[in-house]
Image: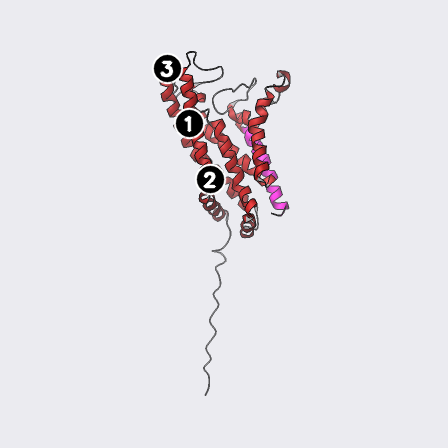
Amino acid sequence: MTATLEPAPTPIRPDHHGLRVTQLRVIRSEWTKFRSLRSTLYTLLLAVVFMIGLGALFSGIQAGQAQGFDPGQTATSASLTGTFFAQLAIGVLGVLVITGEYSTGMIRASLAVVPARLPMLWAKLAVCAGAVFLTMLASSITAFTIGQLLLSGKHLDASLSDPGALRSIIGAALYLSVAAITALALGAVLRNTAAAISTFVAVFFVVPPLTMLLPASWTDHFVQYLPSNAGGMLIDGTYGVAHPLSPWTGFAVMCAYAVVLIGFAAWRLRRADA
């Protein structure tokens, strides 16, 4: 009896082109991780509460004062006061986007899938900035609307056609987006949640008030260049800065800080092991 020999089946080869890592696919992967985390929802929700709730609170307080607004404050800035409290939640969010993976060890899996490393960092920055901008833009519009309704009882309200009003509304979202990017870059550089959040809080919350305790002759030359003071010029109001930068110049200074930190983060991601 003779055995019939059949040809061996052709092995199935994977479509390497279909499995190729692209920047768009990395962004989609990072978006999936971003929206799947409960910390993302909680911190964004807290930022929305700060933005709208505190904006309404401060607008109501201003409406109840007989003398109107404090020096350097306007109807627009009063309704957007919550921006500078929302940045705390946004800073925590930006840090956790990357340090959360370092604390759990998931960063090794992420870098194994994206061996070039930098596309993962760009994707995290894009997803975080995009989500923060869209969420905070809706929140700033809501905060402005509620604030002006509260102020209208004393005829102190502003409208979108007023000078600087629309810029301030969009500027609040831009400011918080850059704050999130800065926090994410700090997290990528320090790779530790507590250290990154502490540094962010020190730079945005602790240092600016402390400079007010120093002689004006010392601070007049540099206080306007601090990240929060510079970026805050995009939102209506001078916030106690003696020589404020112009709105877009101040925002450019804030962006420059973020770019420098991103450069350090990219360098360390390429040179140091996870």
Q: Badge 3: how crowded within 10 Å, few (<14), some, or many (20+)?
A: some
Assign the magenta stretch its main secondary structure: helix
Q: Is residue 161 magenta?
A: no
How far across and down, in percent of the image, does residue 127 sit?
A: 48, 41
Which residue: 45% across, 18% down? 74
The kind of residue tagged 1 is: Gly
Callout 2: SS: helix
Element class at badge 1: helix
* Residue under numbered circle 1: 53
Residue at 49% of width from left, 39% of height from top?
A: 128
Label 2 and label 1: CA atoms lie apart by: 19 Å
Q: Is residue 57 something that shows in the picture?
A: yes
Q: Residue at x 63, y 16 (%)?
A: 215
- Name the foreground residue: 249 vs 185: 185
Q: Residues within 10 Å of mark 1 (few under 14, many from 20)?
A: many
Q: Is residue 160 visible?
A: no
State the SS at label 3. helix
Q: Residue at x 45, y 45 (%)?
A: 36
Residue holding disc 2:
40
Tag 2 near tag 1, CB within 8 Å:
no
Q: Which residues are magenta?
A: 252-274
Is tag 1's residue or tag 3's residue first in the polypeptide sequence? 1
Q: Position of residue 40 (x, y in %)?
A: 46, 40
- Report how far apart the C-alphas of labels 2 and 3 lie in the structure: 38 Å
Choose the circle earlier in sequence order: 2 or 1.
2
Q: Nearer the viewer, residue 193 or 248?
A: 193
Mark 1 touches mark 3? (CB < 8 Å): no
Q: Which mark is residue 154?
A: 3
